[in-house]
Image (cartoon, helix red, strand yellow):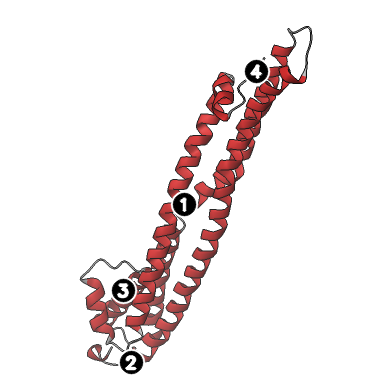
């Protein structure tokens, strides 16, 4: 007796529980790929925006003019938003005629640190989802495989003669669940590791900018407001 052992036939012949496991893994895989492409383009956009702002920042442009330009538009670069947060706090303290230089710098640094944390949290959004998919999917697929093999052997118990031809289809359809689990997990793990490294590099860039900008504010702290 010829049996159809194609993937679609094995899925169609699987038990209801195994089919539900496969369907859930496919949905998770689609969601994972959606997050992967979203993060891929999103991080590339952030990197490009940061590079453009850094080039403008170090071009020697007046800080007040740069701040006005950033404030009047929705800045796409995390560096620009951190700069705006620090400059805004610095100017507020200066307008209040705070004479303590260290207080002005501490206030600006705290504002930049708060903005930095928000930016890092935004960069890390959905990263935990990829980590969960990468760690859980193989076990969900293994559960489907174990259930499918149990179901296959229960069915074989009613047969008087068991051959490889009677065992193979049941085991094969059960193993499809593990294959789908790995199909969902492997891209998620690879993408998570890559994005985590990119986010770490971006975070280092942001921290370095905070230190460099703090040094600039320190040099400008004792100058009149128009000289910033």
Task: Give the crowd class for mark 3: few <14, some 14-19, many >=20 residues within 10 Å.
Answer: many
Q: Alpha carbon of mark 1 to alpha carbon of mark 2: how far?
A: 48 Å
Q: Is residue 70 left or right of residue 132?
A: left
Q: Which label was assigned to residue 2?
A: 4
Tag in front: 1 or 2: 1
| In front of the other: 191 or 174 | 174
Residue 115 place in picture, x, y as percent: 38, 67
Residue that carries the numbered disc 3 in the rendered image: 84
Q: Which element carries disc 1, helix, strand or loop?
A: helix
Residue occupied by mark 2:
222
Q: What residue is rendered at 54% in x and 60% in y?
A: 194
Residue 97 appears in the rendering: no
- Sequence-wise first label, 4 or 2: 4
- Give the mark, 1 or 3, whose residue is nearer the N terminus: 1
Residue for badge 1: 36
Q: Residue at x 22, y 89 (%)?
A: 226
Question: For residue 81, which quarter of the picture?
Answer: bottom left
Q: Earlier in the sequence, mark 3 or mark 4?
A: 4
Q: Nearer the viewer, mark 1 or mark 4?
A: 4
Q: Is residue 174 above or below residue 39?
A: above
């Amino acid at each position: 007796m010829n049996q159809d052992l194609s993937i679609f036939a094995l899925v169609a012949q699987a038990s209801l529980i195994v089919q539900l496991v496969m369907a859930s893994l496919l949905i998770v895989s689609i969601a994972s790929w959606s997050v992967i492409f979203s993060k891929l383009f999103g991080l590339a956009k952030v990197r490009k925006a940061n590079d453009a702002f850094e080039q403008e920042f170090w071009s020697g442009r007046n800080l007040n003019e740069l701040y006005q330009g950033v404030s009047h538009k929705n800045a796409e670069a995390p560096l620009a938003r951190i700069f705006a947060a620090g400059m805004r706090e610095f100017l507020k303290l200066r307008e209040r005629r705070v004479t303590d230089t260290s207080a002005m710098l501490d206030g600006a640094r705290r504002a930049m640190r708060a903005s930095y944390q928000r930016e890092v949290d935004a960069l890390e959004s959905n990263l935990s989802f990829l980590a969960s998919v990468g760690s859980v999917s193989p076990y969900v697929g293994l559960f489907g495989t174990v259930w499918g093999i149990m179901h296959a052997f229960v069915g074989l118990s009613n047969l008087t003669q068991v051959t490889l031809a009677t065992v193979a289809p049941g085991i094969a359809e059960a193993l499809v669940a593990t294959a789908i689990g790995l199909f969902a997990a492997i891209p998620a793990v690879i993408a998570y590791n890559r994005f985590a490294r990119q986010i770490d590099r971006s975070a280092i860039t942001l921290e370095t900018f905070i230190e460099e900008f703090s040094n600039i504010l320190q040099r400008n702290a004792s100058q009149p407001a128009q000289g910033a």
